[in-house]
Amino acid sequence: MSAATVIVAGMSVAAHVLVIVLAAAVIAFIVVLVRSRRLRAKYSVLWFSIGLGLAVLAVFPGLLSWVSDLFGIAYPPATFMLLALSFLLVLVLHFSWELSRLEDRTRSLAEDYALLRLGLAERLVVQERGRDAGPPDSTPARSTESGEA
């Protein structure tokens, strides 16, 4: 058996190294996104936890077999897929909640904006009416009854 085909916990050394490199790449990519402000901190915690979970599974590949045995799942990759699917469902639920919250906030902001525009339009109409009426006559009217001429 060659060094490339050595199996450790059901995974070849090459596959084991690949998973470690991929987990490190995921963590590094998350750091780059956070530092460039393209990923918000509250979402980075979620993705860091996934990256760390992958790293733990990469460093300890027997852990997935242990978890599979614990839950009575005969095929460890099926456990991994179940965990991944569960994570995706939770993620979709979270994003749906976030989207609903943002829709409510957007609607409220649009209503406030419409009310502000209406108030501004009404003030402009009142100002225009005041200008159209002309300035009040400031010269006093002369009385013709006093007999002055």
Image (cartoon, rainbow, N blue to C red):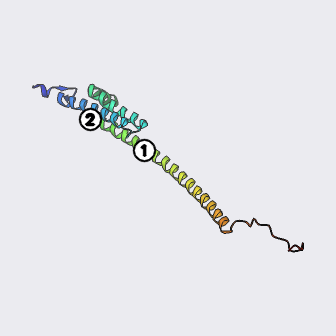
In what quadrant of the picture does the N terminus appear?
Answer: top left
Question: Which amino acid type corresponds to the residue marked 2 in the rendered image?
Answer: Pro
Q: Is residue 128 above or below residue 60?
A: below
Which badge, 2 or 1, is on the more N-terminal residue? 2
Q: Residue reaching furthest front?
A: 149
Helix, strand or loop at label 1? It is helix
Please tell me which residue lies in front, 115 or 137. Answer: 137
Q: Nearer the viewer, mark 2 or mark 1?
A: 1
Tell me the residue that label 1 is attached to: 95
Q: Residues within 10 Å of mark 1 (few under 14, many from 20)?
A: few
Classify 10 Å Cα crowding around label 2: few (below 14), some (14-19), many (20 and above).
Answer: few
Q: Please give left or right for residue 25 compared with residue 1 in the image.
A: right
Q: Residue extending furthest left? A: 1
Q: Position of residue 66 (x, y in %)?
A: 30, 26
Residue 125 tag number: none
The spot of residue 91 in percent (x, y) is: 40, 41
Label 2: element kind = helix
Place residue 127 in its image quadrant.
Answer: bottom right
Tell me the quarter of the image containing the C terminus. Answer: bottom right
- Which residue is depicted at the point 77% across and 66% down? 139
Label placed on residue 77 = 2
Q: Residue at x 21, y 32 (%)?
A: 18
Q: Is residue 87 visible?
A: yes
Which residue sits at x=10%, y=26%?
Answer: 2
Image quarter of residue 21: top left
Q: Amino acid at mark 1?
A: Phe
